[in-house]
Amino acid sequence: MATPLKRTPLYHAHVKAGARMVPFGGWEMPVQYTGIVEEHRAVRTAVGLFDVSHMGEFDVEGPGALAALQHLTTNDVASLQPGQIQYSVLCYPNGTVVDDLTVYRVGDERYMLTVNAGNIDKDWAWVNEHPGKDARWRNASEGTGLIAVQGPKAEALVGRLADRDVTAIGYYRFARGTVAGVPALISRTGYTGEDGFELYAPADHTEKLWSALMEAGRADGVAPIGLGARDTLRLEMKYALYGNDIDDSTNALEAGLGWVVKPAKGDFIGKDALEKIRDEGLQRKLVGIEMAERAVARHGYPVLKDGRGVGVVTSGSYGPAVDKYIAMAYVETALAAVGTALDVEIRGQAKPARVVKTPFYPSRVKKA
Amino acid sequence: MANVPKDLRYTREHEWARQEGDRVRVGITAYAQEQLGDVVFVELPKVGAKVVASKNFGVVESVKAVSDLFAPVSGEVVEINGELPNKPETVNQDPYGKGWMIVVKPSSKTEWDQLLTAPQYEEFLAKGGH
């Protein structure tokens, strides 16, 4: 028998708003409200609200918390000050990816990890296999709601409801405060390439926060955004999605995540394998490609060069803001340079494409 | 409830068919375009191609999904909507009008009667549409 789908604290708000609900990573989530393209444009031009409460949060604290995280994650956690956040990766010993995540330093010896919804159980088992010494772990996923507020008007909207000056919070920084009277961790992060915040709140206050943001954002043109537009927005930024572009068959370096792999910090799971891969050179790279004509390259479609298989598409769609048909694909390193002409095999036909510079759409995140 | 014009016939795969003299115009229903969401790609056969009832004659893709198009009747394609490949969103905007896909000259007279009537299609949708 299938496991029943889990619901976020905002499930009823989504249904009431007319969202189309779909299964995603074990959760029943809104894929769209009015339409993916319209929602995508609302985020690029105004502000959108995303229910990302399905994502997981783990707390780790104690004198050994830093050492435990240094061993588990690829980025250098020692460089993180309280109030700062870093993007990072959990790797297997062979350098492939358990999950990608963000690490928050919430206190001197206290951290919070935010992990992908579909990986919560796997990640929880993984950290419990490598808990470190003098580090206490807690899975806070169930009690935590998470709303992303993204778009050029996000700062003004959150600012009106917050009890503190949110303009002072830099990119990949966070502060505690209240938003619409709800206690929240206000994080200047996101998955869209727009400026904005992710608001962590107690699960039983999440609906109140959502309603207040919808109400207060009416004049800004605020719109609820489903997973469909979340996917096209992140694709235009070439942000990796676990399960599509990265997984236990892709290593962190070929995925383009070398910027968060820091061997100089000391030992960590996957270090030896990743150093070896770096020394020997990458076999393939995750690149952005643009179709020469209208044609949607989708996950799993083969990439060809002169009829020979040279790679595979991992994500692809119409990009509403760039108004082009774009994709991410692993291709042989020799064919990864910008400008390289390739083909994508779509229903038996080779459709022309080329490697392009990414992000496809210019990032407008606030730089600290 | 999605719009189901009374004067059309329907397939269980959510295509509509309209009798126009000795020809049949074909598109996808309002329900189909709603389910698909934003249509971003339409692939149609060439004029002169033969299509077979219940068999695939083309493809429509939305942002999230790829869907085959199924012919309501067998016959020869005598006209295609050349606007659609460049304006796929027309399928969402006007599924029964400007969003039409092909016109077929049917090779069989009996297939038409096997298509769902509007009340039958409405009933099919009421039961879940699949």
Image (spheres, rainbow, N blue to C red):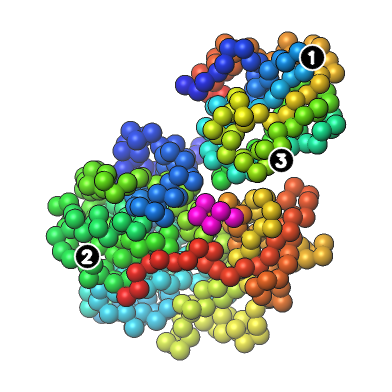
Q: Chain of mark 2?
A: A
Q: Chain of mark 1?
A: B
User: Where does residue A88 sit, x and y in percent of width and height?
Assistant: 43, 72
| Residue A34 in which image quadrant | top left
User: Where does residue A152 sit, x and y in percent of width and height?
Assistant: 34, 59
- For label 3, the SS is strand
Real-space CA distance between mark 1 and mark 3, rounded to the nearest whole angstrom:
25 Å
Which sits in the foreground, A352 or A245?
A352
* Residue hosting label 3: B43
Q: Amino acid at mark 1?
A: Asp
Q: Amino acid at mark 2?
A: Val
User: Which residue is rendered at x = 47% and y = 56% of the image?
Assistant: A233
Real-space CA distance between mark 2 and mark 3, rounded to the nearest whole angstrom:
48 Å
User: Which residue is rendered at x = 69% and y = 36% of the image?
Assistant: B68
Assess whether residue A323 is covered by the magenta stretch: yes
The stretch in magenta equals A320-324
User: Which residue is rendered at x = 48% and y = 45% of the image?
Assistant: A36
Do the numbered discs 1 and 2 sit on residues whose CB atoms are within 8 Å? no
Classified by dominant secondary structure, the portion drawn in magenta counts as: loop
Do the numbered discs 2 and 3 sit on residues whose CB atoms are within 8 Å? no
Q: Same chain, marks 1 and 3?
A: yes
Real-space CA distance between mark 1 and mark 2, rounded to the nearest whole angstrom:
68 Å
